[in-house]
Amino acid sequence: MIAITGLSHISVNVDDIDAALAYYQSLLGAEPLQIFPNFRNEGFARSAGFGDSWDQTDVSIAFMELPSNALTLELMQYHSPEGQVLDHDLSPTDRRRVAHIALKVTGIDAAFAHVRAQPGTRMISNAPDYRPERISPMTPSDFRFFDPAAEADAAQKQATAEIVSNIRFFYFVDRYGIQWECEEGHHDIGDPTG
């Protein structure tokens, strides 16, 4: 068993570290924390899988923090070796990848307008009426808890159904191909006080 103590960061490979810093500052309000320009480090390169060619590895790495310490982004620009540009439209059903990164937000309509206005960012749907939607009303019979005590607690099941029925969200894809979700109204599932 791995003794996990928390989420460390999400890493995004980019083609221009300075442009990426500005982009995520504008898109998500992320604040730059530190940068390692042209980082040539044997231990890093070997751990990253470059083995005996570690001395040919040149990467700039920047860390950014999202508001309220919600998440740390690691931006990596590989100067050498250069990677491939993978460019295909993502579908919410594509497999063998992280599907999306979800951010809890307040003011989801304002968040939607802000994201939609960002150059290089696109919504997951091109439909002109695409917008944040509320999850359709649910009942306690629509889901089950793995914990038998929670499953047997009718009040907890009802409260959770109401929480889920009030969630509004939308998806977007940033200029680096990362799919994000903005979600409002979510509390810890199973904890009606959440």
Image (tube, grey):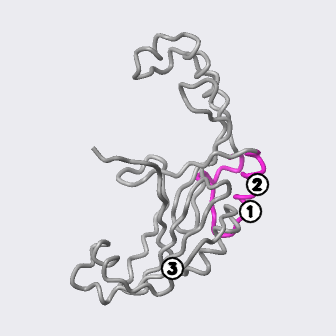
- Whether residues under marks 1 and 2 lie with C-beta atoms below 8 angstroms apart, the answer is yes
Q: Residue at x 63, y 35 (%)?
A: 186
According to the picture, the residue beneath numbered tag 1 turns out to be 117
Element marked by disc 1: loop
Image quadrant holding the C terminus, namely top right
Which residue appears farthest toward the bottom when viewing the image? 56
Residue 123 on the magenta segment: yes
In this view, the residue in front, 26 or 133, is 26
Residue 45 appears left or right of 143 = left
Total marks shown come to 3
Q: Position of residue 179 (x, y in %)?
A: 53, 56
Highlighted range, magenta: 107-130
Could you tell me the amino acid type at mark 2? Answer: Ala
Element marked by disc 3: loop
Q: Is residue 43 above or below residue 180?
A: below
According to the picture, the residue beneath numbered tag 2 turns out to be 113
Could you tell me the amino acid type at mark 3? Answer: Asp
In this view, the residue in front, 193 or 91, is 193
